[in-house]
Amino acid sequence: MKNLYLAPLEGVTDSIYRNAFLKYYGGVEKVFTPFLSPNSTHKFTTREFKDINPEKNDINLNVPQLLTNNPEHFLWAASEIIALGFKEINLNLGCPSGTVVAKKKGSGLLFYPEELDKFLYEIFNKLEGKCSLSIKTRLGKHAPEEFYEILEIYNKYPVSELTIHPRIQSDFYKEPVRMEYFDYAYQHAKAPLVYNGEVKSVSDIEKIEKNYPNIAGIMIGRGLITNPELGLQYKGINPTSNIDINKLKELHRTLLQEYSEALSGEKPVLHRMKEFWSYWQTQFPNDERAIKKIKKSNKLQEYKDYVTQLMP
C-alpha cells in the first residue's frame, strides 16, 4: 500500500473542506493546503491563517504549501509555520496559472534554472534541521526537456519528498501526462518520489504502484474530490466501488453549514458549493437535469431544495 496525499486545489481544499473530508472519509496520510503567498508585509491574510491555524488544522496531517520566489519571504513564512508546530513545508513549483507564472512563481520559476538554484540554496541552507522541505513540481515551462536540468538542481538539496506532476506549464491540465519523464525521475532522482496527475480510480493507483514500486506516495487532487471514498476503496476499508450517497449527503450538509457561517451572503456560499458539484456530478450519471438545476440555482433555498430532490 502506498501513502496517499490529498493535493491542494485553490478554491476547493481549504481548511473547511479538508476537515470535513477527514471527518467523513480520510484514507490519506497527508493533506496539503492551497498555496500561501508570503510577501514583504510579513503577514498572513486571514484566509491564509485559517489554513494553518493549529486550532483548526491537524498539524500531523496538514502540510502548508508556500508559493514565492523570494527566499526572505519564504523563510519568514517558514519560521512562522514551524513555530505553529508543523513538521513539513511544501514549496509550490507546479502552479501553471498565467498570473502566477508571469511573476516567476510556481512553474514559472522553472524556466530560470540559475534563479531556481540560488533560491533553493538559500532556503535549504537556512532551514536545515528545522523542518522537512518537500517540493511539488512540473517538468518545466515550455518543453519537457527542461526537466533534465531541473532535476539536477533538485538533486543537490535534501528534498524530503519530490512530487512530480509530469506535465509542463503550458500543458495546464489538458495535455496527456508525460510518463517517460517520470520514468526518468524514477531512475535519477535522489529524493523520495511522489506521483501526481490523472489518478481517478483504484486501478489508476494500482497501476502507478505496480510500475513504480519504490515511490513514497501518490498525490491525488480532482480524483479524490470527485470520489472522496477513493482512498478507502484502495485500502480495502470500503470494498465496493460505489460511493455511499448517504455519506456524501453528510459531507455536503457539513460543508453547506460551515460555509454559510464562514462566508458573507448567499452568492459566495452558492459559488463555493457549486464548485463541488462540478466534481460530484459524475456520481449521478442518470441525473443530468437535476445537476443542471443545482448549478443554475440563484437562491440558497432553491439550491437546498434541488439538492434534497437529488439526495433525499
Image (spheres, helix red, strand yellow):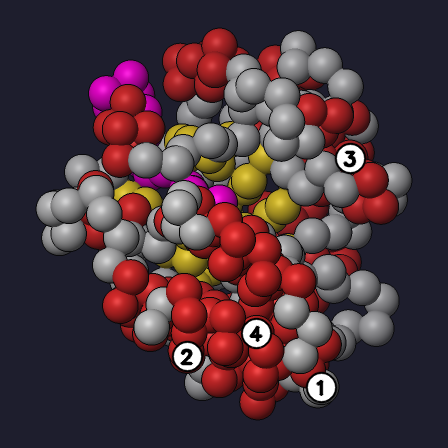
**Mark pair 3, 1: CA separation:** 36 Å
Of labels 4 and 1, earlier in sequence is 1
**Mark pair 3, 4: CA separation:** 39 Å
Badge 2 amino acid? Thr
Labelled disc at residue 4: none
Image vertical order of residue 93 relative to residue 82, above or below: above
Q: In this view, does 243 lie to the left or right of 151?
A: left
Q: Given this view, does label 3 or label 2 mark the residue nearer the observer?
A: 2
- Label 1: which residue? 265
Residue 137 visible to the viewer: yes
- Label 3: which residue? 108
**Mark pair 2, 1: CA separation:** 17 Å
Q: Which of 280 and 207 is in front in this view?
A: 280
Determine whether the residue tagged by mark 2 lies in a helix, strand or loop: helix
Hey, which residue is sitting farthest front in the picture? Answer: 289
CB within 8 Å, label 3 to label 1: no
Of labels 4 and 2, earlier in sequence is 2
Determine whether the residue tagged by mark 3 lies in a helix, strand or loop: helix
Residue at 53%, 20% (x, y): give it.
177
Residue 226: where, in percent of width, then height?
A: 43, 49
Labelled disc at residue 254: 2
Badge 4 amino acid? Tyr
Q: Is residue 222 magenta?
A: yes
Of labels 3 and 2, earlier in sequence is 3
CB within 8 Å, label 3 to label 2: no
Of labels 2 and 1, earlier in sequence is 2
Q: Nearer the viewer, residue 114 or 225?
A: 225
- Label 4: which residue? 303
Range shown magenta:
208-223
Q: Is residue 214 magenta?
A: yes
